[in-house]
Amino acid sequence: CPSNLLAGKRILVTAGPTIEAIDPVRGITNFSSGKMGYAIAQAAIEMGADVTLISGPTALTAPRHCTTIQVTSAQQMHDAVMAEVRGQDVFIAVAAVADYRPREVQSQKIKKHADTLQLELVRNPDILAAVSNLPDRPFCVGFAAESDQLLEHARKKRLQKNVPLLAANLVSEAMGGDDSRIVLIDDHGEHPLPSGSKTLLAHMLLQHMAGMLPPSTTS
Ligand code: C5P
């Protein structure tokens, strides 16, 4: 899709999982490969955007021609996003952020003694909600990965998170692989994209999004 639809736009993307440390050798994470977020960053670069990618730990190579910031935890991802968000035209939250982290990180490896072990978890910041509530917010795009009742949950999530565009996919169809199936949800309703590679879907999503952006005032 060799277009210049996003020329002059500054786009911030989060991708991958976060890891919430329990002790020096263990953590809590989500099963995210990072492929969808990296595909979106790559497609946005090809469409002429100036892209900053904030990524949790993945096995992927950072795209060329973009600024990539590597983070581990949700708090670090939040802080990196907040440090970069000023002046961005678009924020696309693709990362599978851990919703909770252990209340305390043990400085020494936890030894196995008892038959059960309890961890107390506390909520992590919601990065997308934080950005979409900024007074001078960029155009925000959210993702919803659901295991069931996809559209119902996704519609609700778009309103709760206060984002104009949300990409919904089923965990069973999206996680880990090179292909996915996505339904875009905006004020006009639902727009199912054909199933295909994450690369193709990234281009289609960005094309749809480009039509929703306010006209450039600068470039
Ligand atoms: O609430 P839920 O995790 O299902 O929402 C998914 C959307 O919110 C994704 O776009 C994800 O990147 C974003 N999110 C976030 N920070 C969180 C949790 C989710 O940015 N702590």
Image (cartoon, rainbow, N blue to C red):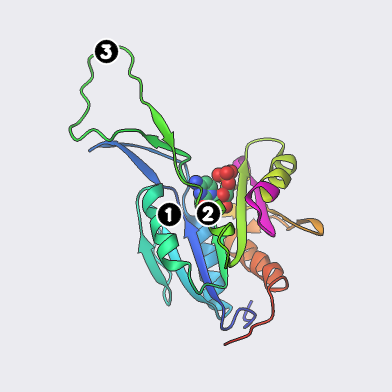
Residue 7 image point, x, y percent:
58, 83
State yes or no: Cβ of the residue under disc 2 lies below 8 Å from any atom of ligand 1.
yes
Q: Is residue 100 left or right of residue 187?
A: left
Determine crowd level at label 2: few under 14, some 14-19, many 20+ residues with C-alpha closer than 10 A: some
Mark 3 or mark 2, earlier in chain? 3
Residue 101 image point, x, y percent:
39, 37
Whether 169 is among the magenta residues is: yes
Badge 1 is on which residue?
78
- Circle 1: element type: helix
Distance between the alpha carbons at the discs numbered 2 and 1: 9 Å
The reply to whether callout 2 and callout 1 are in contact (CB within 8 Å) is yes
Residue that extends furthest to the bottom in the rendered view of this protein: 219
Residue placed most toward the observer, 190 or 174 = 190
Q: Which mark is residue 114?
A: 3
Q: Amino acid at mark 1?
A: His
Residue that extends furthest to the left in the rendered view of this protein: 108
77 is higher (above) or lower (below) than 1: above
Which quadrant would the N terminus be assigned to in this image? bottom right
The reply to whether callout 3 and callout 1 are in contact (CB within 8 Å) is no
Badge 2 is on which residue?
130
Whether 186 is among the magenta residues is: no
